[in-house]
Image: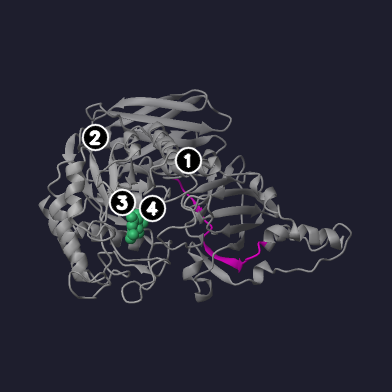
Amino acid sequence: QAANFVDHLHNPSYLSPYLSKPITHESMIYDSGREKESLNGFWNFGIDQYDTCLRAKWFEEQYTDEDGRTNPIDFSFDEWEKIKVPSSWNTQKEKFFYYEGSAVYTRTFMYAGKSEERVFIKFGAVNYDAKVFLNREYAGFHKGGSTPFFLEVTGRLKESNRILVVANNTRKREQVPSENTDWFNYGGMYRDVEIIRLPQTFIKDFAIHLVPGSSFSKIGVEFVLDGPELDGEAMLTIRELGLSLPIEVRNGQGTAVLDAVPELWSPEHPKLYEVTVEYGTDCIRESIGFREIRVEGTDILLNGKPIYLKGISAHEESVPNGKAVSEEEMIENFNLAKKMNCNYMRLAHYPHTEKAAKLADRMGIMLWEEIPVYWAIEFDNEETYRDAENQLTELIKRDRNRASVIIWSVGNENADTEARLRFMSSLAKKAKQLDPTRLVSAACLLDHDNHVIDDRLADYLDIIGANQYYGWYQTDFSNLIKLFENSKPDKPVVITEFGADAKAGHRGTVDEKGTEDCQLDIYKKQVEVLGNIPYVRGTSPWILYDFRCPRRLHTTTQNYYNTKGLLSEDKSYTKPAFYVMQQFYENK
Ligand code: GCB
């Protein structure tokens, strides 16, 4: 027996039982516009560096083995220290700051059931993977650190319940992103955890949009039901438009195209309508904007009119809160963008919280949303592809009713190889198939040897995203002019990044890297060139404010921060280059 126990702890494949119930986009439910009960709060928390919870099955809470012998116990869940959910563990205590690995979260909660209902637990995001246990049993695992997942727990809840989550943020070669990025790898359950109660049959998926090419006069609706009552009638109501219509549902699918002439959503006029869709006793009620986005030649057209994307890039991070950015902080970020005269923001390099897109809907900011297919990842690994495609699908299903979101990005700065082309073109096709109403792009690497925009992936994109650092990484600035002379794109180009490090308040000459003067000089030269290229239809310089980054070790100018921000990391200080963008966008 003792030998078995030792074997069990040393079993190299201890993880395999916990990979048997993957939670993917297929188990997603449309949860926007629904009532939820929060499981946020203080959870018991233990760093579990050797994954002993999984190896020794702590979650079973078995203190006695089959022969009646009491095993030594290495955990005491309810005595563990507490940590806030949602939060990034790194920001909660100094001793957790650099921790990467496995950690156990657990709490108990009460549940009083109503008859006939179905119950789900939603995890807004856990970085990078999560293994979930409910009442001593393994329930499933999810991977992908920035998208939500849902666990059906119907019939498995008692009056008092224990939930336990093993969260692991180990960076791995085969993951998306891979082990090397240019941002801090925060860990933990950093978005809301919630209970959702639904009727037996409910609306599992729901999409609503202006029908492309309908002269802004048709609204398309598609939805999918889950449950036993798959044939019937749903009701769609948009009171302000005088719409209240039954939609026939067959085999759990309902689609309709309705005549309606809504006021169109735009940054200047972020009009939202209250939309209700009901099926039986199920009801979704949320605020929806209607707009059309498309490209024509090298133009980007919003509601039929050419626009310039006056943007700024942003990470999902704040100094006090890591990735668990508060709503106030998001509003502050959008307001800073507006102060810069932006109408658009690039949410880099992974899906930010869905709250961001909801706020952007209200505040009138167009968004680029991205999945973390970043730099070198295992493009020839099929499992890596499945992970990336799942993250893309989860993102699109989550945010496809947000008028603010105009672009899905399938990645950032990936070298143009055969394997990468296969991988990323498949993602681009997938995005188009899931959502034909938006544009697909990627932030491409340019050919810096020949100074030309030349990436085979461009054939699969609506907009060519181009990152370039002329004046900074590409030291000879004059090559930026050559780049545009050498390139003849037949699609709109958006300069997804340019920029330079500048430590807040650090002054010097324009030739001194890391000074505000150098950053300012580069920004001035950049906008002068970019403003005159007709096919450049937008920019999102890198980046709104400085962010934590473990690979930035220059003591004077970085100190573990990427200092390419236009503001300092706590946003209390604005660097001079901010005003260059403000002026440039005012004139655009
Ligand atoms: C890039 C990356 C971005 C980096 C930035 C930099 O091209 O897309 O994630 O942070 O450059 O500062 O080097």
Tell me which label, 4 or 1, sits earlier in the chain. Answer: 4
Give the residue type at disc 4: His
Q: Is residue 142 above or below residue 66?
A: above
Count of all numbered marks drawn on residues in the image: 4
From mark 1 to mark 2, how far is it between C-alphas?
Answer: 24 Å
Residue 582 can be seen, yes or no: no
Q: Is residue 38 above or below residue 300?
A: below
The quarter of the picture showing ligand 1: bottom left
Residue 399, x across and y down, in percent: 39, 43
Residue 389 bears which disc, if any?
A: 1
Q: Residue furthest left?
A: 587
- For the residues labelled 4 and 1, say whether their Cβ atoms are less than 8 Å apart: no
Tell me which label, 3 or 1, sits earlier in the chain. Answer: 3
Q: Which residue is mark 2?
A: 295
Left or right of 29: which side holds 425?
A: left
Residue 346 bears which disc, if any?
A: 3
Q: Which residues are magenta?
A: 34-51
The front one of 510 and 145 is: 510
The front one of 163 and 542 is: 542
- Quadrant containing the N terminus in the rendered view: bottom right
Residue 126, x across and y down, in percent: 51, 55
From mark 3 to mark 1, how far is it between C-alphas?
Answer: 20 Å
Crowding near the residue tagged with mark 1, few <14, some 14–19, many ≥20 C-alpha atoms within 10 Å = many
Disc 4 CB within 8 Å of nearest ligand 1 atom: yes
